[in-house]
Amino acid sequence: MTSKRLCFEPGHKPKCLVIVDDTAEWDRAVYYASRWAIRAGGGVVMLRIIEPDEQNQEWLGVADIMRAEAHDAAEAALDRAAGRANGIAAITPERVIREGAAMEQLLAVIDEDPDIAMLVLAANPGAEGPGPLVSLLAHALGTFPVPVTIISGALSDQSVDSLS
């Protein structure tokens, strides 16, 4: 794993990585990251991870069809998130789609882009818990390669504006 971040070196700019998933709170992370990009003079990288389906679907091309549908859904989700970021900060975020285990793909994207300066996640404010990715990351935070900012899903745009 790359240990040196280059985000503030000449010829580089800091980027904020955001996960665009199917949770209701992804918008809070995109909002915060977009506002951060304005203030830091940086960019935003939006990542959509397609986790493999564990069922045996090799027959009749079902796996290929499901994979194509997952990519279409990922593109649509990134379109919505990029539109939101553009509306907030007039930026065009980078878009990345990866297939595989969430933590493995997340770390690979960070490793491959030395300009990523931080990961922004949003936590579900409901009683069911903060969300799957926030829960998964809680065990790895002590060794994570970049700072992680977790935004409450309950924060309004105005609250995020005052924090970013």
Image: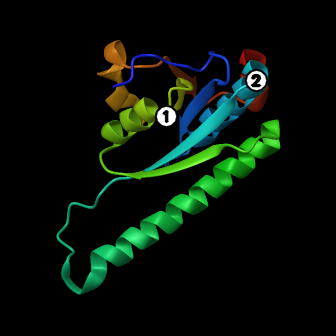
The image quarter containing residue 11 is top right
Q: Residue furthest left?
A: 56
In what quadrant of the picture does the N terminus appear? top left
Label 1 crowd bin: few (<14), some (14–19), many (20+), radius 10 Å: few
Q: Compute the Cα span from label 2 to label 1.
A: 33 Å
Q: Which residue is mark 1?
A: 126
The image quarter containing residue 43 is top right
Residue 74's place in the image compared with 17, above or below, is below
Q: Residue furthest top?
A: 142
Disc on res. 41: 2
Q: Nearer the viewer, residue 112 or 119?
A: 112
Q: Nearer the viewer, residue 45 or 135?
A: 45
Whether residue 32 is visible, yes or no, is: yes
Q: Residue at position x 37%, y 78% from top? A: 65
Whether residue 130 is visible, yes or no, is: no
Q: Residue at position x 55%, y 45% from top? A: 24
In what quadrant of the picture does the C terminus appear? top right
Q: Residue at position x 67%, y 17% from top? A: 10
Which element carries disc 1, helix, strand or loop?
Answer: loop
Q: Earlier in the sequence, mark 2 or mark 1?
A: 2
Disc on res. 15: none
- Expressed as whole percent of the image width and height from the top left, the position of residue 105 reads 36, 41
- Expressed as whole percent of the image width and height from the top left, the position of residue 160 reads 72, 24
- Expressed as whole percent of the image width and height from the top left, the position of residue 140 reads 31, 21
Q: Nearer the viewer, residue 75 or 80?
A: 75
Three-letter code, disc 1: Gly
Asked if residue 55 lies left or right of residue 130, the reply is left
Q: Give the label, 2 or 1, closer to the camera.
A: 2
Asked if residue 90 lies left or right of residue 25, the reply is right
Residue 130's place in the image compared with 142, above or below, is below
Asked if residue 141 lies left or right of residue 7, the reply is left
